[in-house]
Image (spheres, helix red, strand yellow):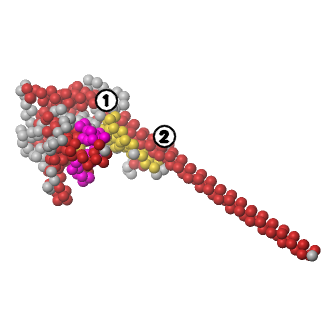
Amino acid sequence: MKSFITFNKIIFKKGQNGVALLMALFFVVVMTFLATSVSYDTLIEYSVSSQSVNRLRAYYAAKSGTELSLLRVLIYQKALAVLPKELEEQKSMLDPIWQFPFAWPPTAFLPEDMSKVERGLIAKLEEESIMEGQYVTTIEDEAGRIDINDLGSSSEKIREATRKQILKIFEIELENNDDFNDKYSSFEFEKLVNNIQDWVDEDKESKNGGDEKSNYQDIISNFGNSNADFLPPNQSFKSIEELHMIPEMTDEIFNMLKTRVTIYGVKGININSAEKDVLKSLDSQITDEIADKILERIANKEKGGPFKNNDDFVGFLQGENLSTDSFNEDGIPLLYGSEHNFVIKSTGSFAGVTKEITAITFDLESLKARYVTLLEEEDKEKSGGGTGTGTGTGSGSTQSQTTQTKAKKKTPSGRPTIVFWREN
């Protein structure tokens, strides 16, 4: 009996040891799980916080590039304002102030043939800088594109000229793009342009007939009757992307148009910054060959460089055997240098994170002066008091010179006027 009790005690003691071991193992597993969970959560929070800091640094790198570009635009505008009258025809020499792209840090984009001394000086500047991120900025000119908001202009001449230019763009694309021609050869582009004009004009009657809202029933039904008064807005486009909402507009047509049109135009076309198709849309006499020669002349200083004024441009056209008497019969205002609305694009990056800022500056003073001049000249023509436009190029030249004279009375100061700002 005594031995049996002793045996039970031994068994019970071993059982206690086994339970203690199991409990110890359980607590070790729990603590390991908690430690792993806390460690994982900490790593996630650290990663999220780190990415937030990286995004912030990339954003401020992009903003730094944007602010520097705005400074370049201001310097260019000031340089134009103080330019002596004797040098006005050489104003294109100031274009490099804004034309060239800029990047930071510069050592990442230096040419290979640069000397070690020059590289060393630039590297020293980088070391002294507190900017840890990178950015690349470009400044583009909107003055060489067709302003679709001019379809709702108070000037009948500008409205009709803009319509014809856009229709000419479609005609050019049909001629030069076989795939586009196969798909859209029977497409009613005039109906599409009418729909675009209905968006911006003030009346409620569609250019295609009937009520403008009848074209938006599908969209209105999706939004609900409470939004029936929203479309079309009968006001200027706020962004190029709004073209997607125009009836008959397709993605392919939009992608073709977006590089040729703008909503920040200068009430005319700047010959020195216009693309090939925009040049061809001015007059049927400008063929592919003539347009290429115009672009070649603008890009090559040895051949004359950018056109200085209307006489320079007309003389060039006459040298190419174009009939300048009938050129630009629609009277599209043609500009030659200092009329710019700039699109600034700045891309900042840090630790693999990228941010992009797009800003658009608007020269309100010059635009207002030019628009007033256009309306005054149109009123004189309607009343019979004008001298006529002669060639369309002549009218454009007069408007450009008048605008420049008025704009130079005030030297710009402070931040350029920003009408658009988008962060991606």
Q: Position of residue 247 (x, y in %)?
A: 22, 48
Mark 2 surroundings: few (<14), some (14-19) or many (≥20) residues within 10 A: few
> As shown in the figure, which amino acid type bears the numbered disc 2?
Ser
The percent position of residue 258, horizontal first and vertical second, equals 26, 47
Name the quadrant containing residue 209: top left
| Residue 109 location (% of width, % of height) | 39, 48
Secondary structure state at the residue bearing disc 2: loop
Picture layout, residue 413 above or below residue 56: above
Q: Is residue 56 left or right of residue 221?
A: right
Residue beneath the point at 68% across and 58% down: 31
Which residue is at a point 83% across and 69% down the rendered structure image? 12
Magenta region, residue range: 226-253
Q: CA distance from mark 1 to mark 2?
A: 28 Å
Q: Nearer the viewer, residue 321 or 344?
A: 344
The amino acid type of the residue labelled 1 equals: Lys
Question: Which residue, given by chain and number where applicable, does mark 2 sit on?
Answer: 129
**Disc 1: CA contacts within 10 A as few (<14), some (14-19) or many (>=20):** some
